[in-house]
Amino acid sequence: MKTILALVAVSILASGCATITEGGKQQIAVKTVNNGNDLNEAFCELSNTRGTYFVKTPNSITVEKSTNPLNVKCNKEGFQVGTAVVESFTKADVFGNILLGGPIGVGVDMMSGAAYIYPKMITVLMGQSITLNKEENAKAFAAEEEAKKSPSQPTK
């Protein structure tokens, strides 16, 4: 009986830990746009304090999450360079870890990068430098999560 209670307790505590449930990596889709039209085959470099990653658009790549911004620079011959600074944000459910995992759980999530998230899609505008700030990213993420919870409405 004690073993079962211990397993239940560990399961409850672990469920609040982003390091265990999501990890420190995230898949991000990257696309490039020029004058309102999708531009394929641009070569993009993404970098943050945890690494440098390369992708040819449109495509997805897995990056290490960080509290620091993800800097994106895309090039294609015959086009001006496009850059984006993509700020990460702290997910709201990480704060629940304060209750379940305590300061140690929160510390682990922050050190591993699991507490942070970038947008799932980054659109780089060729010839422009943009910043995707954390407030806008957090609102977009919350809207996506809410849409997942809402049942689909039948079309008439």
Image (cartoon, rainbow, N blue to C red):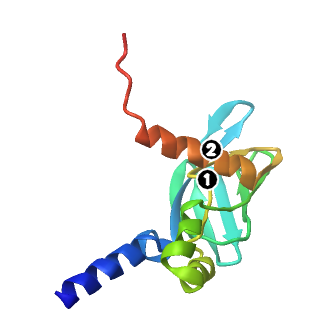
**How many numbered callouts?**
2
Quarter where residue 153 is shown: top left
Mark 1 or 2, closer to the camera = 2
Labelled pair 1, 2 in contact (Cβ < 8 Å): yes
Q: Inspect the image, locate mark 1, and give the three-letter code of the amino acid beneath it.
A: Pro
Crowding around mark 2 (Cα neighbors within 10 Å: few <14, some 14 to 19, many 20+) is some
Q: What residue appears at the point 59 percent right and 67 percent down from the top-left corner?
A: 95
Q: Residue furthest bottom?
A: 2
Q: Would you say 115 lies left or right of 18 here?
A: right
Q: Which mark is residue 12?
A: none
- The percent coordinates of residue 106 (x first, y second) are 58, 78
Relative vertical location of residue 115 with respect to residue 75 in this rendering, above or below:
below
Judging by the rendered image, the residue that carries numbered circle 2 is: 140
Distance (Cα) linking label 1 and label 2: 8 Å
- The percent coordinates of residue 119 (x first, y second) are 61, 53
Judging by the rendered image, the residue that carries numbered circle 1 is: 119
- The percent coordinates of residue 13 (x first, y second) are 41, 77
- The percent coordinates of residue 24 (x first, y second) are 53, 74
- Viewer-side residue, 7 vs 72: 7
What SS does tag 1 mark? loop
Q: Residue furthest top?
A: 156
Tag 2 or tag 1, which sits nearer the N-term?
Answer: 1
Relative vertical location of residue 148 with respect to residue 21 in this rendering, above or below:
above
Q: Inspect the image, locate mark 2, and give the three-letter code of the amino acid beneath it.
A: Ala
Q: Would you say 140 lies left or right of 132 here?
A: left
- Viewer-side residue, 11 vs 117: 11
In this orientation, does residue 30 appear? no
